[in-house]
Amino acid sequence: MKTAIYPGSFDPITSGHLNIIRRASSIFDKLIVCVMVNAGKNPMFSQEERVELIRRVTGDLPNVEVDCSNELLAEYARQRGRCVIVKGLRAVSDFETEFQMALINHKINPDLDTMFLTADSQYMYLSSSMVKELGTYGVELSDLLPSEIIPDFQERIESRKKQL
Ligand code: ADP
């Protein structure tokens, strides 16, 4: 069975992430979407909330499992058994960091390979941080986020504004 892990912060999951999930889930027998901790970021949604949002939008994909981890990705992958890492690449700027990450993961866990899917041209500009920024200005979100999570996102933007 060919299993892949798609790791990320998914804060929140965007239409670009979902596009990669759909395409990867049709390539692999099983796809594990893993919400990782990113120490450098102050998240909008907790890890559990992000897992729930991803589960909600991937409910129609039976071979997709959503999980979370606070471990090193290479270690998490080792525990999940034989698998590869899948990453989405938007631009050359992604490539440099992702290439470095892939080499480090391979060094820590020599059985672990990383495969890249190029972003759909429609989503090349899209990142979670960009959506959060645009959200505060009330920009139309329907091309940026899966429709099922837009109310949760808007509610969080509003409660953050009140805290300022
Ligand atoms: P973000 O940069 O949006 O905060 P994450 O850290 O959650 O994203 O990224 C998880 C993975 O998804 C990374 O491999 C990233 O390159 C990829 N990714 C993010 N946005 C897109 C997109 N719009 N299209 C394709 N891949 C993407």
Image (cartoon, helix red, strand yellow):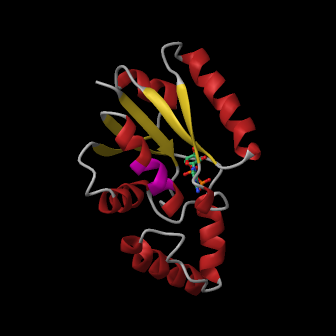
Please give the name of the residue rendered at 37% of the width and 56% of the height, measured from the top-left corner.
Answer: 48
Residue 125 spot, x, y in % from top left: 67, 61
Residue 27 visible here: yes
Q: What residue is rendered at 65% in x and 84% in y?
A: 137
| Residue 131, quarter of the rendered image | bottom right
Instruction: Specify the quadrant that holds the N terminus.
Output: top left
In which quadrant of the rendered view does residue 146 lie? bottom left
Location of the C terminus by quadrant is bottom right
| Residue 16 relative to residue 18: left or right | right
Q: Residue at point 56% right, 79% down?
A: 160
Which residues are drawn in magenta? 17-22
Whole-percent x, y for residue 111 in the image: 48, 14
Which residue is located at x 62 percent, y 57 percent?
Answer: 121
Dominant SS of magenta comes to helix
Marks counted in the figure total 0
Q: Residue furthest top?
A: 110
In percent of width and height, residue 117 lies at 55, 40
Residue 68 visible somewhere in the drawing: no
As drawn, 131 above or below 100: below
Q: Is residue 92 above or below residue 108?
A: below
Q: Nearer the viewer, residue 76 or 82?
A: 82
**Residue toward you, 147 or 106:** 147
- The answer to whether 27 is drawn above or below residue 44 in the figure is above
Location of residue 90 with respect to 52 vertically, above or below: above
Apparent side of residue 1 relative to residue 123 in the rendered image (left or right): left
The residue lying furthest to the front in this view is 121
Whether residue 80 sits left or right of residue 119 in the image: it is left
Horizontal and vertical percent position of residue 8: 52, 46
Magenta stretch containing residue 104, yes or no?
no
